[in-house]
Amino acid sequence: MTIKENLLAIKNSLPEPVTLVAVSKTKPVSDLMEAYEAGQRIFGENKIQEMTDKWEQLPKDIQWHMIGHVQSNKVKYMASYVTLVHGVDSLKLLQEINKQAKKHDRVIDCLLQIYIAEEESKFGLDVNELNELLQSETFKELQHIRVIGLMGMATFTDSEAQIKKEFQNLKAIFDSTKGITAANFDLSVLSMGMSGDYKIAIACGSTMVRIGSSIFGTR
Ligand SMILES: *Cc1c(COP(=O)(O)O)cnc(C)c1O
């Protein structure tokens, strides 16, 4: 199957409200162009340097999503063009994104990453940290970021029951957080699901899936 065939098959299988982020990390720009020519406009990368290189080379109507762990000192390289930052897991990082967005007179949309997996290595906030962040005065004063949703990754396991439990947990957190109102806070996006688990994620209420290897092949 070609990239185009993979992409269109997945796209056609997604229910209407679910947005597809084509995860193109490590892949050459020629692969991204193939997906672009098949109609894809949202691409996800996990390294700021690589994303910026690709942004420079590719058509400017592409929306770039940073899906990886973000280092504060690199935010400045993507602040002029990034569409959505998925992996925000601290107030300090939000403050840095806010500072860099301000320099470009922009508001950058962000998702807060929530820790739902059993693995030690996964980044993210727990529910208490999430609530603490949202209720802090420092957060409420940030005018150049907007938190529009939550993001999470399930444990890498063959157990569908476990993955389902974790996604249901994230959906419950999402629903319970929805009631909070602030000028820079408006939850509409629930980013969960990758190649191996996106069908489960959608059944659990995902509105945005991040799919790489099922489109572009193994890395
Ligand atoms: C790489 C990556 C994906 C895509 O993974 P696939 O299994 O290739 O679909 C999704 N989300 C994040 C955060 C990633 O780093």
Image (tube, rainbow, N blue to C red):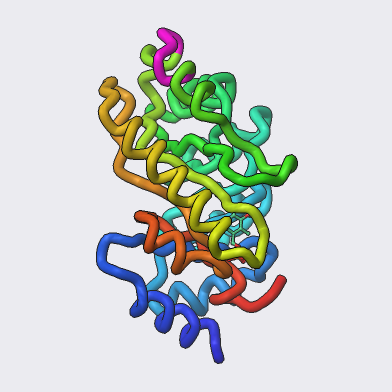
Foreground: 219 or 121?
A: 121
Is residue 136 magenta-colored?
yes
**What x and y, as percent, mark residue 12?**
34, 79
Q: Where is 210 relative to 13, above or below?
A: above
Foreground: 67 or 129?
A: 129
Q: Where is 62 relative to 88, above or below?
A: below
Residue lying at 73% horizontally and 40% vertically, measured from the top left: 120
State whether residue 178 appears in this view. yes
Residue lying at 36% horizontally and 77% vertically, measured from the top left: 13
Q: Which quadrant does ligand 1 occupy?
A: bottom right
Tell me the quadrant of the picture where the N terminus can be found.
Answer: bottom right
Residue 170 lies left or right of residue 148; in this view the side is right
* Outermost bottom residue: 1
Residue 171 placement: quadrant: top left
Magenta range: 133-138
**What x and y, as percent, mark residue 152?**
52, 46
Is residue 170 magenta-colored?
no
Marker count (numbered): 0
